[in-house]
Amino acid sequence: GSGGAAGADSASNYSKISSSRTIRAAYAVGAPLFIIDPNTRQKSGIFHDLVTEAANRLGLQVNWNEEIGYGEMIQGLRSNRYDIVGSGVWINSDRAKGADFTIPAYYDVVYAYVRADDSRFSSGLEILDSPTFTISTMDGELGAAIATADFPKAKRLELPQNADFSQMIANVVEKRADIVFLAAGAAAEYQSANPEKISKASSEPVRVFPNAIMLPQGAYEFRQALNYTLTEMLGDGTVDRILKRYEQTPGTFLRVAPPYRQPTAP
């Protein structure tokens, strides 16, 4: 439709959310962003807690209505199956072609990880761009995009998008692949459950990504309401408290810097 139609949809989208008092939120499961306890089915995780608190402040409920894979998120937003992807996604140009985002709640630093006894990359990742090495990736997940952009000559072992995230790491541990790109938080989560299996290939970050809630394009009023609420939660320390709750290793999640400075005394 034309820009005008999108604007009308946007207003009706938010008025529908306001009148139903409910945000329909899809989610991809993966610690520490979004966790489901296998026994109790209890939901938790950074974005579970952020979205629940933001909705609360807006006088809304969250209906976690659909589990989805990374590759199908935008399609579901477009066909109006849910109002947001509430489990947090990295903002990048490819996703921006088909979706919109809130402001970042925090930043994820991504490193390359190898088997704990593998020191081949200790002097840097340049040598990875060669068919000698295999990168473990998952369809629709950003490791695959990093592999294509930075290391096009390397081989790929790619899982389907609905595969279990931990399988991507297992492919390295079990020597089917050499290296995997992981956010420091997800890696710390794996390392605490599986000590001495993987370690950083080198100390240089591969990427730093802003982590945000994903919305459909054109949901202007709703996005603004979420942005102002997140701004409030960043300012009053709520976001920091939630991050600390899930931070296995202090400093894993890069915080949003405050947008102001203290004036110096005259």
Image: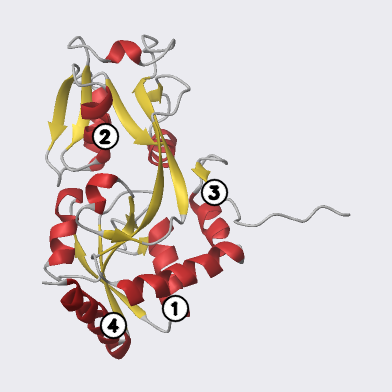
Judged from the image, the secondary structure of the residue bearing numbered disc 2 is: helix
Which label is found at residue 183? none
Cα–Cα span, label 2 and label 3: 22 Å
- Earlier along the polypeptide chain: callout 3 or callout 4? 4
Q: Position of residue 14 (x, y in %)?
A: 29, 81
- Based on the displayed image, in which of its 4 quarters is residue 66 positioned? bottom left
Circle count = 4
Residue count near mark 2 (Cα–Cα under 10 Å), binned few <14, some 14–19, many ≥20: many
- Earlier along the polypeptide chain: callout 3 or callout 1? 1
Residue at 31%, 10% (x, y): give it.
Answer: 127
Q: How is the image coloured?
A: secondary structure
Judged from the image, the secondary structure of the residue bearing numbered disc 4 is: helix
Which label is found at residue 17? 4
Residue at 39%, 35% (x, y): give it.
Answer: 187
- Earlier along the polypeptide chain: callout 4 or callout 2? 4
Cα–Cα span, label 3 and label 4: 30 Å
Residue that label 1 marks: 56
Cα–Cα span, label 3 and label 1: 23 Å
Residue that label 3 marks: 255
Residue that label 2 marks: 143
